């Protein structure tokens, strides 16, 4: 994740220590134990994206798990899931993100979330929001989720087209309002595509109007049905990031308490540094040191991020589902994750020696780390090729030709 609020605007949060190795003055001394400054970003335990079910009530055109409204046999039982939670707690992972499919369709979700909290784990929820009635919002709050991220890809027409179900927008907005009403920390998740980038201004207007305090902009990864709509428009991506920076800065300068992040393209970090340099911002070099400490992709997939799918298979991240590291029914997650003989994990944890081309020659390699290896794999067939979604110019990165 690239913290726009902190890097570009200087606004801290409780998560700054974990992401950038510094305590934030804006956190008011409220740093959670789980977000103490690690001695090195490379030593982080992974945040777990747990696709607790593949079943979903929508059919989103960019769904990375290719989920549908049907039952998928073989999902982990409640007992098996609790055994996984026991291991994750013992392994001291920072957090579990319950995702799907649509996780609210899993009948024991609240039981599992409550158990995870009882075991000392931080829990978050990723949902499409359409099922969140007033009663459901209270149940979510009671289960102790520290944060709920709701997918919203634009205003009504655009959102409904992306979600594949008419009326999804109205239900999602109702779900957001129900969560806000019960005091649940809630934010938005938007996938950046050539279609949704045009919705950025309207989304920021919506955020302010509805009292939302957090938004994450995800760069599209061509996984699952996302392959069908994936395209690369470098200029439009840059315009979209520029608009995110501008609107974030405007709101924060007005005193609106907003956390803005971008996800799944670590080139955003160097881009922010270049923008600060262009603007003669005195924070520029400090920001660059912070993104270098973070390492971008160097410490993401296979290091700081892991995925467990509904069948118990473990993956380097939630998009790399065709590669199984092991299954939690056969070995504990902690054993799978620390297996020094696993070839893909070995390379992901020492990617400097494997990545080639434009990414490897880039002057920002230590800050970006070659971004998302799975996107390179999906687009080029080679996980060690340059990330095709990088929008920085050759001049900006001091690379001339492959």
Image (cartoon, grey):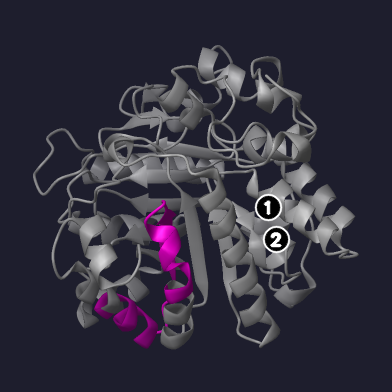
In the rendered view, does 333 fall on the left or right side of 157?
right
Q: Is residue 97 above or below residue 373?
A: below
User: Which residue is disc 2 drawn over?
Assistant: 16
Q: State which region is magenta.
A: 174-202
User: Which residue is disc 1 drawn over?
Assistant: 19
In the rendered view, does 236 fall on the left or right side of 254?
left
Q: Helix, strand, or loop for circle 1?
A: helix
In this view, the residue in front, 193 or 188, is 193
Q: Is residue 121 above or below residue 300?
A: below
In the rendered view, does 231 fall on the left or right side of 80?
right
Q: How far apart, in angstroms, are the residues tagged by discs 2 and 1? A: 5 Å
Res. 124 visible in picture: no
User: Which of the 4 image quadrants contains residue 3?
Assistant: bottom right
In this view, the residue in front, 130 or 234, is 234
- Residue 207 in the image, given as x and y percentages of width and height: 46, 78
- Residue 48 in the image, given as x and y percentages of width and height: 46, 44
- Residue 130 in the image, given as x and y percentages of width and height: 21, 68
**Labels 2 and 1 touching (C-beta < 8 A):** yes
Residue at the location (32% across, 83% down)? 177
């Amino acid at each position: 994740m690239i913290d726009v609020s902190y890097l570009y605007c200087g606004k801290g949060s409780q998560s700054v220590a974990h992401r950038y190795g510094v305590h934030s003055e804006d956190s008011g001394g409220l740093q959670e134990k789980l977000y103490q400054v690690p001695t090195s970003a490379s030593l982080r335990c992974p945040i777990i994206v747990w696709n607790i079910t593949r079943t979903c009530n929508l059919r989103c055109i960019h769904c990375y798990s290719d989920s549908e409204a049907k039952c998928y046999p073989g999902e982990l039982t409640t007992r098996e899931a609790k055994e996984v939670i026991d291991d994750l707690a013992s392994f001291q992972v920072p957090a579990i993100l319950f995702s799907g499919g649509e996780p609210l369709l899993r009948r024991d979700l609240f039981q599992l979330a409550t158990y995870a909290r009882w075991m000392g784990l931080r829990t978050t929820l990723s949902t499409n929001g359409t099922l969140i009635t007033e009663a459901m919002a209270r149940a979510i709050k009671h289960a102790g989720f520290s944060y709920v991220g709701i997918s919203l890809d634009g205003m009504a027409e655009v959102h409904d087209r992306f979600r594949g179900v008419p009326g999804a927008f109205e239900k999602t907005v109702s779900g957001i309002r129900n969560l806000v009403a019960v005091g649940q920390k809630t934010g938005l998740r938007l996938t950046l595509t050539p279609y949704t980038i045009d919705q950025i201004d309207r989304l920021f207007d919506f955020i302010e109007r509805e009292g939302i305090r957090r938004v994450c902009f995800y760069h599209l990864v061509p996984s699952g049905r996302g392959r069908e709509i994936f395209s690369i428009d470098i200029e439009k991506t840059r315009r979209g990031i520029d608009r995110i920076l501008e609107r974030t800065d405007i709101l924060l300068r007005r005193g609106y308490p907003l956390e803005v992040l971008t996800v799944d393209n670590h080139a955003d970090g160097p881009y922010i540094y270049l923008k600060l340099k262009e603007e003669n911002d005195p924070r520029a070099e400090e920001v660059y040191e912070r993104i270098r400490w973070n390492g971008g992709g160097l410490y993401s997939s296979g290091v700081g991020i892991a995925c467990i799918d509904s069948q118990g298979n473990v993956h380097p991240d939630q998009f790399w589902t065709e590669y199984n590291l092991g299954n939690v029914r056969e070995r504990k997650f902690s054993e799978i994750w620390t297996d020094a003989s696993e070839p893909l994990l070995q390379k992901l944890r020492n990617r400097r020696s494997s990545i080639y081309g434009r990414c490897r020659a880039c002057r920002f390699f230590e800050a970006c780390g070659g971004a998302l290896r799975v996107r390179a794999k999906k687009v080029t067939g080679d996980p060690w090729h340059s990330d095709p979604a990088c929008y920085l110019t050759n001049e900006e990165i001091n690379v001339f030709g492959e």
